[in-house]
């Protein structure tokens, strides 16, 4: 658990990253995962083509290509889940940031 806290900045004393920094970091991670997703989709397509090409002539190679395709599809599912979680976190942070700004402005207006 301490390792996870260190990875996300919770292990050091003091204040954590600002909301904007956290949102930007989540966006960067989303971009990186989207690129990886595209790469995996291309690899899956390639493995499927390979399996079709080998077909009945080289059954062993076709089966190996299908196994690799299945493994890549599992990785793709994991990335999809991670992306959903990151999107949810980013949306929550953006909403919290908006609410904070609105409350600050309302407090400022109340003082005037």
Image (cartoon, rainbow, N blue to C red):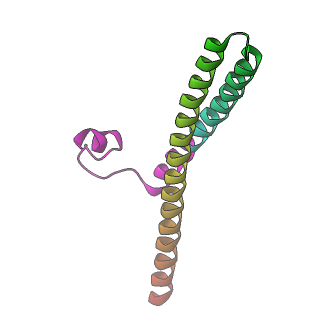
Left or right side of 74 for 10:
left
Residue drawn at x 57%, y 37% as measured from the top left: 76
Q: Is residue 6 magenta?
A: yes
Q: Position of residue 18 (x, y in %)?
A: 42, 54
Residue drawn at x 51%, y 48% as measured from the top left: 81
Residue lying at the far top of the rendered structure: 58
**Which quarter of the image is occupied by the N terminus?**
top left
Decide which of 50, 84 is in the foreground and name it: 50
Left or right side of 6 for 78:
right
Q: Is residue 90 magenta?
A: no
Residue drawn at x 53%, y 69% as measured from the top left: 98
Q: Quadrant of residue 43?
A: top right
Left or right side of 60 for 56:
right
Decide which of 11, 60 is in the foreground and name it: 60
Count of labels in the image = 0
Residue drawn at x 49%, y 66% as measured from the top left: 97
Q: Quadrant of residue 54?
A: top right
Q: Position of residue 9 (x, y in %)?
A: 33, 44
Q: Position of residue 29 (x, y in %)?
A: 53, 41
Q: Quadrant of residue 19?
A: bottom left
- 5, above or below 19, in the image: above
Left or right side of 94 for 62:
right
- Which range is magenta? 1-29
Q: Position of residue 91 (x, y in %)?
A: 54, 61
């Amino acid at each position: 658990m301490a390792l996870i806290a260190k990875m996300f900045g919770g292990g050091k004393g003091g204040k954590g990253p600002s909301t904007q920094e956290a949102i930007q970091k989540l966006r960067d991670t989303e971009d990186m995962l989207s690129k990886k997703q595209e790469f995996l989709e291309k690899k899956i397509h390639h493995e499927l083509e390979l399996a079709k090409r080998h077909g009945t002539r080289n059954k062993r190679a076709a089966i190996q290509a299908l196994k690799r395709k299945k493994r890549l599809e599992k990785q793709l599912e994991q990335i999809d889940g991670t992306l959903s979680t990151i999107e949810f976190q980013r949306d929550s942070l953006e909403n919290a940031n908006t609410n904070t700004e609105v409350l600050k402005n309302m407090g400022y207006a109340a003082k005037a």
